[in-house]
Structure formats: C-alpha cells, structure tokens
C-alpha cells in the first residue's frame, strides 16, 4: 500500500519499537506479529524492557494484586492462550465480603467459572522456596516465540528523524522505527517526553496504591483464606476497598482508593474485620511491599502519527481487570496497525473507540463507587446488603442479584454498565427488601418470615 502524508502503513520488513514489556507491550507484540504474518508481512519488533522478570521483588515485578478475571481467562482460552499451572498460584473459588456488620461468602454465579491469582514477577523479595514463573515473564515469552526481540534497556529519549519516531536509552543511541507502541504503564518518566512530543496526548490521571506480600505457609493460608479472595469494605477515608489474595504460601494485601494516606496499610491490617480473618498479619513483617500508581482516568488522545499508547498509559478499567484492558487495547492497536495503518487518523478511527468504551464504562463505575461509599456510611444499609447476600447464598440455584453485583464489582468479570443494569433490576430491589427486613428484625424473626416472602415472591412473578 502506498504511503501518503496522511496515511502510513506497515510494510514488509518495517521496524516496530514497543516501550515496555508488561502485559500491554508483550500482548501487542504478540498480536502484531501473528496478524502481520497472517497477511503475509514480516515485521521486526523490538521490546524495550529494563526489568528482568526472573528477579525477585520490585526489580522483577510490575506491582499488582494479580487477579486474572474469569472473563479474561475465557478470552485467553478463545485466543488459544492457556495460563500454565506454574503461573497460576491459586484457582479462586469464592469471594468473602467483610464489613463491620459481618461477612458473607459469595460463590461464582456459574459453576465453570475460573479466576486465577498470579504473581507478576518471580515472587516477593524475601521469597522462601523456589522462584515462580510470573505472568509477565510468561506473556513476554509468548511474544518472543512469535519473533519479538527483547532489548534490556530503558528508553529515556524520544526524537523524530526524517518523519519517523526514534527511541533509545540516550540521545546518541537512538534507533528509528516505523511505529512506536508506548506500553510503559503509568509509573514511568517517559510519558512526560511523549506528552511534549505528541500533540494532544495527556497521560492518565493516577493515584497511589499499596501492596504487601506476607509469608504464612500453605497450611495457614488454607486455614484462614483457603481459595477465597477476601474483600474488606472499611470505614477509612479514601479507601474504596482492601483485599487479601491467597497465593501459594503467601498472601497479598492490596489497598485501592484515591488520596490514601501513608499509614493506611497498618490501620487496615489492625482493623477488627481483617484480624477476624488473619489475626497475625498486623504484627508480621512483610516479605515485600510497594506503592505503585494506578490509572484512575484515561489518557487524552492516546495516539499520533506512527505512535500509539496502549494499556495503562492509555485506558484501563477502574480498579479491576487492568491486565484484561491491556490485552484488549493491545489487540485493538495491533489490528489497527496491521489492517488499517499507523497514521494518527487510522488510530483515531479504529483504535480510539476501544479506549473510549473503557473510559465511558468507568464513568458508570465512578457512580457505583459513590453509591457504595454512601452505603458504607450507613449501618442499616450495610446490614441490609450483607443480609441480602446471606439470604441469596443460602438459596443456591436461585437468582442471586445482589451476589452477582458484588461478584462483578470485585472480580472484574462484568462491565460497570452490566453492574448498573443489575442494580436497576426490580429483582435486586426485592432482594434488598428481604435483606432490610432481616437487618431490621433480626435473623430469628427473619427465618420465620422467610416462608411469607417465598409466597409473595411467587405471587409477584
Ligand atoms: C495495586 C494494584 C493492584 C492491581 N490489581 C490488579 C489485578 O488484580 N488484576 C488486574 O487485571 N489488574 C490489576 N492492576 C492493574 C494492572 O497492574 C495494570 O493494569 C497492568 O499492569 C497494565 O499493564 P501495562 O503493560 O499497561 O503496564 P505495566 O504492567 O506497568 O508494564 C509497563 C512496563 O513498561 C516498562 N517500562 C516503563 N518505562 C519504561 C521505559 N522508559 N523504557 C522501557 N520500558 C519501560 C516497565 O518496566 C514495565 O515492565 C492493579 C494495579 C495496581 C496498582
């Protein structure tokens, strides 16, 4: 295809730079090479990644809670990607929601649901035992198997040479490319340079998060958490929710929210709700910890001529399924580059809609989090929600609208739009009425009135 000032294509033998070998970069390189080969083109792809994912601790890890949603597991399977047992630390079979008013276990809505907990790197800094295969090493290997070359350098400089982007570790070591994919995540200084070089590009808004790893040993993890992710809705300003995730012999503690203060992790681990599950965590020394930033509002204009931003440095789902967003934006960007072109117009028309859809869904998500935060402030509302989940979970095989909302909220399975639709469903209102009745009159009376509700429920169908 011909190249004009307004339309650029990737031709046989062209060179592509990918800045960052996390999920967005590795999946982009993987799909780009597979799709290009499918249309008879051979590309040279360099992935710049300074981190060695075989190293323990922060040197080999892109800090993350490491939950791979059921939706993403299904998408992987459809694309022929199967996470090997060495990567999956635990297969999660339930979530347990904890509040000051009690706890409720939520099992998956479908029996064949699989959620995985993974490590992104080789394991915590003070790993006891053998290093693991992290998700990032596995995905980077997939890209390398398709022919991508990994360059163990950090990109510190960007320039334009004869109408092409050039990147490299220093100004005198720049290499010219036909396309540059920026997949550096949000914890990278390189975005500032791109913001100056690409008209309209504004990096995402970010906020600080907290992650810690604790060694408990398999027997204690089994006895305390089992294969269930523990979600904590605590009354702490700024904190949306905290999680404890079982991983092999370890537990990952993760806090998500905006404007969280410094000693928040200590306060959370000392909270009675957390101590009820794992009393020893607040006194234990973590094996590893970090405070990475997370994308809370999408980038503006994530593309330019021969440059595209993918994954966290473009758009990602709010507080969940970031790996899935990296995967989807990577695939959309690769399809655009191979099938349409690499000009700004091509990315605007064929790639931007994937990012916009994520951000529009997040707007609904923000409303839902505002609703949850209101619910957290009122004891009766908390008891009502908890009671309705307990009721639903006590009646397996029946419709469980409140459980489904909670499941989709924290597993990353459903979109925020789907959750909003569920919230507006009259059957959820009915579940809340039942829960409210139980919360107001106690479990004793509630159990006796269950038959009455059962009859009314049937009559109202
Ligand atoms: C606390 C927390 C918990 C999370 N939990 C989950 C979860 O449970 N499930 C989930 O799906 N998502 C989760 N996420 C989100 C998920 O981590 C991200 O969405 C995902 O990692 C984005 O992938 P990425 O490839 O865009 O960026 P990253 O994973 O950040 O990868 C970027 C890569 O680029 C490299 N890089 C950076 N700068 C340069 C440079 N100048 N030159 C070369 N290379 C560079 C980095 O070394 C890194 O390897 C969580 C995030 C946080 C902060």
Image (cartoon, helix red, strand yellow):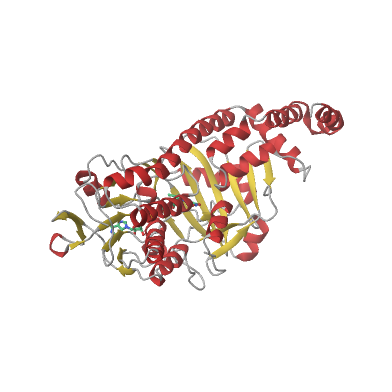
In the image, is residue 312 above or below residue 257? below
Question: Which of 25 and 42 lies nearest the eye of the viewer?
Answer: 42
Residue 404 drawn at (x, y percent): 65, 41
In the image, is residue 140 above or below residue 285? below
Question: Which of 41 and 375 lies nearest the eye of the viewer?
Answer: 41
Q: Residue at x 65, y 57 (%)?
A: 226
Side of 205 relative to 327 (left or right): left
Residue 363 drawn at (x, y percent): 46, 34
Side of 211 relative to 333 (left or right): right
Q: Quadrant of the C terminus?
A: top right
- Asked where in the image residue 222 lies, by quadrant, the reply is bottom right
Q: Residue at x 24, y 56 (%)?
A: 2
Q: Quadrant of the N terminus?
A: bottom left
In the image, is residue 54 above or below residue 69? below
Query: Can you see residue 262?
Result: no
Question: Which of 221 and 324 lies nearest the eye of the viewer?
Answer: 324
């Amino acid at each position: 295809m011909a190249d004009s000032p307004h339309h650029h294509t990737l031709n046989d033998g062209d060179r592509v730079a990918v800045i960052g070998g996390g999920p967005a970069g590795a999946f982009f390189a993987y799909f780009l090479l597979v799709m290009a080969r499918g249309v008879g083109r051979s590309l040279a792809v360099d992935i710049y990644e300074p981190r060695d994912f075989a190293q323990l601790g922060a040197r080999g890890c892109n800090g993350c809670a490491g939950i791979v949603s059921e939706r993403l597991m299904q998408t992987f399977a459809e694309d022929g990607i199967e996470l090997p047992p060495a990567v999956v630390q635990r297969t999660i079979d339930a979530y347990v929601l904890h509040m000051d008013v009690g706890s409720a276990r939520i099992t998956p809505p479908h029996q064949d649901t699989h959620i995985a907990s993974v490590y992104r790197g080789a394991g915590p800094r003070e790993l006891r035992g053998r290093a693991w295969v992290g998700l990032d090493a596995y995905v980077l290997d997939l890209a390398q198997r398709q022919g991508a070359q990994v360059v163990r350098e950090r990109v510190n400089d960007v320039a334009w040479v004869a109408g092409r982007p050039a990147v490299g570790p220093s100004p005198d070591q720049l290499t010219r490319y036909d396309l540059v994919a920026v997949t550096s995540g949000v914890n990278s200084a390189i975005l500032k340079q791109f913001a100056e070089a690409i008209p309209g590009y504004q990096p995402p808004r970010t906020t600080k998060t907290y992650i810690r790893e604790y060694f408990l040993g398999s027997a204690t993890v089994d006895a305390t958490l089992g294969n269930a992710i523990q979600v904590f809705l605590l009354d702490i300003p700024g904190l949306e929710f905290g999680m404890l995730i079982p991983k092999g012999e370890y537990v990952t503690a993760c806090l998500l929210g905006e404007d969280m203060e410094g000693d928040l992790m200590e306060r959370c681990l000392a909270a009675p709700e957390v101590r009820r599950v794992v009393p020893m965590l607040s006194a234990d020394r973590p094996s590893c910890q970090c405070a990475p930033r997370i994308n809370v509002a999408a980038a503006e204009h994530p593309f330019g001529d021969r440059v595209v931003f993918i994954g966290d440095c473009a758009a990602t789902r709010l507080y969940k399924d970031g790996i899935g967003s990296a995967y989807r934006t990577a695939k959309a960007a690769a399809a655009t580059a191979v099938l349409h072109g690499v000009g700004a117009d091509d990315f605007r028309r064929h790639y931007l809609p994937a990012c916009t859809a994520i951000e529009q869904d997040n707007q609904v998500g923000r409303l839902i989090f505002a609703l949850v935060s209101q619910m957290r402030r009122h004891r009766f509302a908390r008891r009502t929600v908890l009671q309705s989940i307990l009721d639903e979970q006590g009646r397996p095989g029946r419709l469980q609208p409140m459980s489904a909302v909670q499941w989709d909220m924290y597993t990353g399975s459903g979109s925020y739009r789907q959750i909003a639709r569920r919230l507006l469903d009259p059957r959820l209102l009915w579940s809340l009425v039942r829960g409210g009745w139980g919360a107001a009159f106690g479990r004793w009376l509630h159990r006796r009135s269950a038959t009455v509700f059962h009859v009314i429920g049937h009559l109202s169908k």
